[in-house]
Image: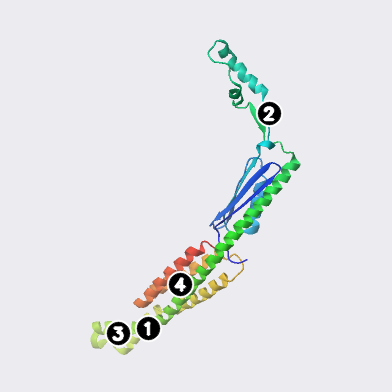
Amino acid sequence: MPISGMTGFGRAEGALGGWTWAVEARSVNGRNLEVRFKGPPGFEGLERAAKEGAQARFQRGNITVGVQAKRSEGAVSVRVNVDQLERYLALGAPFMKDGRIKAPRLDGLLALRGVIEADDAGLDPEAQAELEAAIAGSIGAALNGLLTARLEEGASLLGVLTDQVDRIGERQGQAAEIASGQPAAIKARFEARLKELAGEAATEDRIVQEAAAMAVKADVREELDRLSGHVDAARALLASDSAVGRRLDFLTQEFMREANTLCSKAQLAALTTVGLDLKATIEQFREQVQNVE
């Protein structure tokens, strides 16, 4: 599967036997896969369908699946709870007898709690199973829509990430070119400083010896070689068909480690400038990688 993002939205609707429902699936970035389900009372079994469906499609992200379902009024049987109504009338009878209240109207009595009962749970087990299966199908459709949205985000991210990796590679090349001049610059700087302090006592042998030791400490060839290898690894990951977000995140840390060392060893202002630009590019890359599954 091509590179995928971690944010997106999917929706599906359905109807069966007097019921209508809507399913929404949405996701945001997350280090691992976490699935939350919100559904109507009596449909707790749908949580399993939501979690298994998400696990089959995604590897990372915080995913929320919400189901809203309602039964049409014509499909709900309504009855009057006569016993409850009689209790209300009995409680009010003394107050009507002594004239403190008037006889209640029918619409007022029917509005009292518990007088009108709607039988929302009247589905037999077979009908309940059929309804849940239909809603589970809509959950799958919503998750498919979410998957499509995340893949579309991934397609957009791929271009951005590829461009940023290319820029990191360019900065590595610039740093390598500048760094090749560090030994000579170190020697010239040390020679001028030593002659300023020691005068004629500053022999060429001593200058070469001390400058060589400083050049070894400032040698950035290993860091540049590792950066080049990391660039190749990043390009390979971006071309892969698996979830690469975690590995790209780890690679970003390696990028930054080498860039920090490069800046700390830089003896030339131009190399420091390139190193700082490299770090800024790596940070931009890191921010985008947080969106990759």
- The numbered disc on residue 183 is 1
| Mark 1, secondary structure of its residue | helix
Q: Which residue is mark 4?
A: 258
Q: How many neighbours does mark 4 have within 10 angstroms: few (below 14), some (14-19), or many (20 or more)? A: many
Camera-nearest label, 2 or 4:
2
Residue 267 in sight from this viewpoint: no
Camera-nearest label, 2 or 3:
2
Residue type, label 2? Arg
Q: Residue at x 67, y 42 (%)?
A: 19
Residue type, label 3? Glu
x, y percent for residue 229: 52, 76
> Taking 85 as reference, is 41 above or below it?
below
Q: Which residue is mark 2?
A: 79
Q: How many neighbours does mark 3 have within 10 angstroms: few (below 14), some (14-19), or many (20 or more)? A: many
Q: Which residue is mark 3?
A: 191
| Mark 4, secondary structure of its residue | helix
Q: In this rendered view, identify the residue nearer to me: 74 or 7.
A: 74
Answer with mark 3 or mark 4, whichever residue precedes in sequence.
3
Measure the alpha-carbon separation of dots 2 and 1: 95 Å
Q: In this rendered view, identify the residue nearer to me: 268 or 15.
A: 15
Answer with mark 2 or mark 4, whichever residue precedes in sequence.
2
Q: How many neighbours does mark 2 have within 10 angstroms: few (below 14), some (14-19), or many (20 or more)? A: few
x, y percent for residue 65: 60, 50
Count of marks, rendered view? 4
As drawn, is 181 to the left or to the right of 45?
left
| Mark 3, secondary structure of its residue | helix
Measure the alpha-carbon separation of dots 2 and 3: 103 Å
